[in-house]
Amino acid sequence: MEIISYVQDDSRRRVFSLPEIQWRRPSKVRSASLTSNVFSTDLRSFRAQEVRKPVNFRTFFKTVGSSITDAGDFVKDNGKRILIIAFSVVAAATLLFGTLRLVEHHINHTGPVLLASDGGADIENLNKLMSKFALAGTVDYDESGNLLDVEISPKSFNFTQPVSYQTYKVRSGDTISGIAKKFGLTNISTLISVNDIGNVRQLAAGQKLKIPSIDGIIYTVKKGDSLNSITGKYKISLEQLLDVNELTSETLTAGQQLFLPGAAMDASSLRNAMGELFRMPISAKFRWSSPYGYRIDPIAGVKSFHTGTDMACPTGTPILAAMSGRVTTTGINRVYGNYVIIDHGNGYQTLYAHMSKIIASKGQWVSQGTRIGLVGSTGYSTGPHLHFTVYKNGKLVDPMSVLK
């Protein structure tokens, strides 16, 4: 009864031991003496090893299935508690997210501007204020590039003589239209095409231009072109095309250049060459929050004319010059807050308002894409955004019509 006494009386911790047993591979003996040979007490001792079950797909899936069953039983037994915990986590996350949004709104929004008793007059002034910012501009050509108020000389339509060229060195103060007038041309796209000018704004004093004797554009022959297809597309006569280019054969080769008398660049290509295609003043992610035109004023709640388009984005987002030009005005007032005005030439001006910070300086020349300020909510504003206005010849233009 030694073992029972050990279990019942732990304080005495009586020690017992088993005889040392050693496993030894039995020799070929008769079965009758096998037991006595193997379990002999005078053999060396051994220790029992942990039993390891073989690992295979059967045992793996059996273990996984058992775990899934146990998990299902746990969910079944504690379903109500799990739902309460999940609901509490979702509610806490929603409350935290909402709190963060409220804090962000409070930090980034200036709130409504308190208007004086004559608030209606202030709203009307808001619609007119931009006209005071716009600079007077003059343009002496139409959308097709035709020069205005120019006397048409007979040689402009003399397409029976071969085209000839002369060289002109650009002087300080020259304009593309002024040069065209000087040499009796009637369309500015002639000089742009002949000289392959990508952007007229990049012309510099000292640059040399080829001046053709008549109006027209350069056309590079493509594979599959024929004289008939070219004359049909540009609506010119075959005889004039042959005479002007001194062609003795109707056979054309790809890459050959022809002068198309009387032809002009299409409006889109001309606007691109004149630098009149604006790029987005915000390159980061933004939201169109208010379009150009009549709307219900978000602060006063009355119908008013919105002079530009609004791009909502976080405070500090970089504002870029929509087109190259010279910064003519930087300042601050109660309507536009911190603002910058750029004169792009050709009658175009742009206004960038509600900035948190002005980076450009008055008189600075900026290229398209130059950083001029940071988005904010200064002035007459309910939240961080860029107010972008475009003027052409002193008149408002829908920004969406010029942005590319």
Image (cartoon, rainbow, N blue to C red):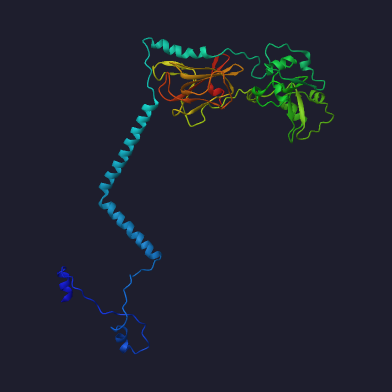
Tell me if residue 392 comes above or below residue 269 in the rendering.
above
Work out whether residue 358 or residue 126 is closer to the camera in this orientation and state it: 358
Q: How many marks?
A: 0
Work out whether residue 267 or residue 396 is closer to the camera in this orientation and state it: 396
Percent across and percent down for residue 262 are: 74, 21
Where does the N terminus fall, quadrant-wise?
bottom left
Which residue: 60% across, 13% down? 137
Q: Is residue 330 left or right of residue 95?
A: right
Percent across and percent down for residue 40 are: 29, 84
Asked where in the image residue 277 lies, by quadrant, the reply is top right
Work out whether residue 365 or residue 54 is closer to the camera in this orientation and state it: 365
The answer to whether residue 146 is seen in the rendering is no
Which residue: 33% across, 33% down? 99
Which residue: 52% across, 30% down? 283
Q: Is residue 39 left or right of residue 127?
A: left
Work out whether residue 260 or residue 204 is closer to the camera in this orientation and state it: 204
Asked where in the image residue 41 lies, by quadrant, the reply is bottom left
Which residue: 73% across, 28% down? 219
Q: Is residue 200 left or right of residue 75?
A: right
The answer to whether residue 134 is seen in the rendering is yes
